[in-house]
Image (spheres, helix red, strand yellow):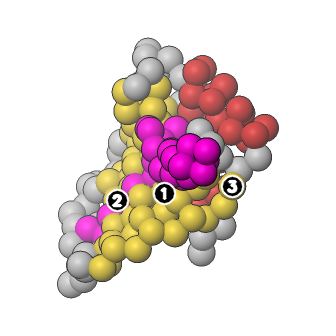
Amino acid sequence: MKSIVLMATLVLSANAFSGEALIKFTRGSGFAPIPYSSVLSVYETGKVEVVTTRGTTKTKTQLEDLSPNTVQEIKDNIEAVKAKDVIVDLDANKPRCMDAPSSRIIITKNKKEVMIASFASCHRNQMQSKAATALIKKTLEIDAKRK
């Protein structure tokens, strides 16, 4: 009996971060003497983790546990994002730059990753739908807690 309980505990522990993240917010330093990147992931369990790489050092941190209501709100907005939603360059009339930091917000919908926003080459790009905008806002709110 003890072995069954132990196995169940191990399986549940392993599944805490398993599966696809609902949202991933990736950042990269661009050209830098010591490369930096981070990935903030929001899982269906409500767990939020950040994996940061600075040079060759990688750290993983659990940031918080989201409430079931917040997770459901995220899932509802992901469901509302449509394939026809296009990413718009909000800085289309500005020049591009090189070697600048970049970031992307990616959702997982129907087991596929869908980018809903990015900042690269000094241009902001994002889907304009209400659902995508709500997901971007929520991701940035969660990310602000780690600073």
Category of crowding for the residue at label 1, using alpha-carbon neighbours closer than 10 angstroms: few (below 14), some (14–19), many (at least 20): many
Q: Quick check: 142 above or below 90? A: below
Q: Earlier in the sequence, mark 1 or mark 3?
A: 1
* Labelled pair 1, 3 in contact (Cβ < 8 Å): no
Q: Amino acid at mark 2?
A: Ser
First reached walking from the N terminus: tag 2 or tag 1: 1
Answer with left or right where residue 133 lies relative to residue 60: right
Tell me how many marks there are. Answer: 3
Q: Choose mark 2 or mark 3, whichever is in front.
A: 3
- Local packing at callout 3 (Cα closer than 10 Å; few below 14, some 14-19, many 20+) is some
Which residues fall within the magenta stretch?
A: 1-30
**CA separation in Å, label 2 and label 1:** 14 Å
Residue 13, position in %: x, y? 54, 52
Question: Can residue 41 be seen by looking at this rendering?
Answer: yes
Side of 30 where 86 appears, left or right: right
Query: Can you identify the residue that label 3 sits on?
Result: 65
- In the rendered image, which quarter contains the N terminus? top right
Graded by Cα atoms within 10 Å as few (under 14), some (14 to 19) or many (20 or more), the crowding at tag 2 reads some
Q: Secondary structure at mark 2?
A: strand
Quadrant for the C terminus in the image: bottom right
**Residue drawn at the location 40% of the way across and 70% of the way down:** 52
Q: Position of residue 123 (x, y in %)?
A: 36, 51
Name the front one of labels 1 and 3: 3
Q: Which mark is residue 102?
A: 2
The percent position of residue 134, horizontal first and vertical second, equals: 65, 37
- Residue depicted at x 46% and y 26%: 109
Q: Residue at x 52, y 69 (%)?
A: 61
Q: Which mark is residue 40?
A: 1
Most extreme residue toward the front, as rendered? 1
Q: Amino acid at mark 1?
A: Leu
Label 1 sits on a secondary structure element that is strand
